[in-house]
Image (cartoon, rainbow, N blue to C red):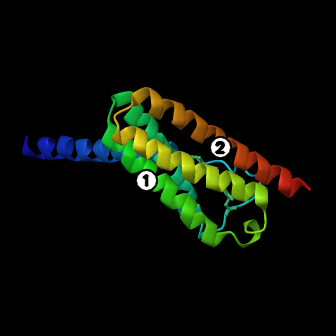
Amino acid sequence: MNRRLWISGGLFMVLGTFAGLRFNTLADEGVRPIPNTLGRSVDDESAPVMHAKLTASQRVLEGLLNRDFKTISTAAEILSQLAVAAHQHQEQDRDDLIYEHFRTEFIRLSEQLETMAEDENLEGAAYVHQSLTATCIACHRHLRDRDAE
Ligand code: HEC
């Protein structure tokens, strides 16, 4: 009897391990790398910064949905800091006036978003968030066009 208990106990452990592995596989599938939207590889140094940008803009949306102004202002502050820091990385972008225009606009909008969140202005914050997203797309589009030249 004892022996049978041991065997069934062992079987549960094996099954449990398999279930755990399956769970891990599912989790890994959920964290696939972000597709290369620029059509060129991002170097190891800038990749974490770029992913932080994406995460921060998702946090803004999360804050807007929950009417959580603290989350919006924190994420907006991160976005403006990332845009300021990005400048130091990109040698080739320093002489590109269009890139500079989008970067400056991005910083202006993220600072404005922070103010809107501090004023607890949900509609204003939602509006600025949309302009910010438009600037993401516009700058990326410009980079693609520039690379295609
Ligand atoms: C002023 C221009 C500019 C703006 C605005 C901008 N980006 Fe980027 N982004 C870049 C550049 C430049 C790179 C590529 C960096 C490199 O090649 O190392 C990049 C890369 C990325 C990547 C990595 C793409 C990949 O190839 O894996 C993500 C993700 C990203 N940006 C998200 C965003 C999001 C989200 C926003 C808006 C919240 C945004 N970016 C706004 C310039 C910009």
Dot 2 amino acid type: Thr
Q: Nearer the viewer, residue 117 or 41?
A: 117
In the picture, the disc for residue 77 is 1
Whether residue 55 appears in this view of the structure is no
Q: Quadrant of the N terminus?
A: top left
Measured Cα–Cα span from mark 2 to mark 1: 16 Å
Judged from the image, the secondary structure of the residue bearing numbered disc 1 is: helix
Q: Nearer the viewer, residue 33 or 145?
A: 145
In the picture, the disc for residue 135 is 2
* The image quarter in which residue 93 lies: bottom right
Q: Position of residue 148 (x, y in %)?
A: 88, 54
Q: Position of residue 134 (x, y in %)?
A: 65, 38
Judged from the image, the secondary structure of the residue bearing numbered disc 2 is: helix
- Sequence-earlier tag: 2 or 1: 1
Whether residue 98 appears in this view of the structure is yes
Q: Nearer the viewer, residue 17 or 59?
A: 59
> Residue farthest to the left?
2
In the picture, the disc for residue 49 is none
Q: Quadrant of the C terminus?
A: bottom right
**In the rendered view, would you say 90 is above or below 1?**
below
